[in-house]
Image (cartoon, rainbow, N blue to C red):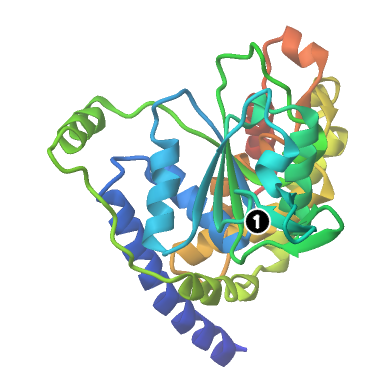
Amino acid sequence: MDTVLGVLQQNVEQECHHLKALQSEIGNVIVGQTHVVERILVGLLADGHLLLEGVPGLAKTLTFKTLASTIQAKFQRVQFTPDLLPADLIGTTIYNPQSGQFTVKQGPIFGNLVLADEINRAPAKVQSALLEAMQERQVTIGDHTFPLPVPFLVMATQNPIEQEGTYPLPEAQIDRFMLKIRIDYPTRQEESQIIDRMTRDVEPVARPVMRTEDLLRARKLIPQVYLDEKVKNYILDLVFATRQPDRYRLSHLAPLIAYGASPRASLALAQASRAYAFLRGRSYVTPDDVKSIGYDVLRHRIAPSYEAEAQEMTSESILRQIFETIEVP
């Protein structure tokens, strides 16, 4: 057992070295936002989609585009609007009058890294088409089903301020996002660096430091990262506390939670914790890994009740009480 863990640790350290170089290269373009970059890499390693929430102008698009450049992946950006059609996203069939046949024109969903900008502006039909792509890793155009490229990661963004003309994401689709990442404003010092860096004659460009094959090789190590039984039970306690708070000395939260996290949350938290430990160069998961990534995994999977809204309680504040109460192994 010790020999197996020792070999795994060596493999993790070797692959983690490439990812440190990747983070460093992204840092040559993106100022700050280390939390966001780290979470994006967790999603990429854990094969989970991301939902980013932040006001416009916080370099969400630039970050994702820079990441695509560093791993030599195909980047696609889709601006979601109320008049967007499913065919604009997944593609359509085009009739050729000369040959008398239909040919398939693939849409922008056929990319490795797909940015769904302002996803909550798209109508339900487009969101349903995206849901199949996110969950099944395939799309259906006409009578044909096409697998999506590997790796395939959707990073959706939404503006937390302007709600006019938006369509709230259905719970089934929100649950498909492994992480919901909140982006804050940069510090004054960081914003000064942004001005210096982005107002030069030549804007910084990231160099390729990895191939998608390297990423897929690193991804294969994630399920092997050791998850102790005590840490697994800690994950289960956190998730079950959102469904049955009475059993965890959190009875005061019961009327504040309309519904708790699904079993997909347990899977996502375990997988994301493994990827987070991997980024730290470790072959095992600690409770601190779970706590560090837990808010990003769970914040969009808890629905506050009307009573919680009346008390100005958010999913974030509910989660804070759960993390403070559940005993850490």
Per the image, the residue denoted by label 1 is 329
Observer-nearest residue: 316 or 35?
35
Percent x, y of residue 166:
67, 19
Q: As drawn, which residue projects farthest toward the bottom?
A: 3
For this view, does 87 lie left or right of residue 34?
right
Residue 288 spot, x, y in % from top left? 54, 53
Q: Residues within 10 Å of mark 1 (few under 14, many from 20)?
A: few
Q: Is residue 249 visible?
A: no
- Residue 53: % across, % down: 55, 30
Residue type at mark 1? Pro
Quadrant assignment, res 311: top right
Q: Quadrant of residue 242?
A: top right
Rendered view: 122 above or below 110? above
| On screen, residue 187 above or below 202 | above
Q: Residue at left 39%, top 26%?
A: 57
Quarter holding the N terminus? bottom right
Furthest residue in direction top, as rendered: 310
The quarter in which the C terminus is drawn is bottom right
Q: Is residue 328 left or right of residue 42?
A: right
Q: What residue appears at the point 79 percent right and 59 percent down from the top-left corner? A: 101
Task: Identify which residue, 101 or 210, lies in the foreground.
Answer: 101
316 vs 244, left or right, is: left
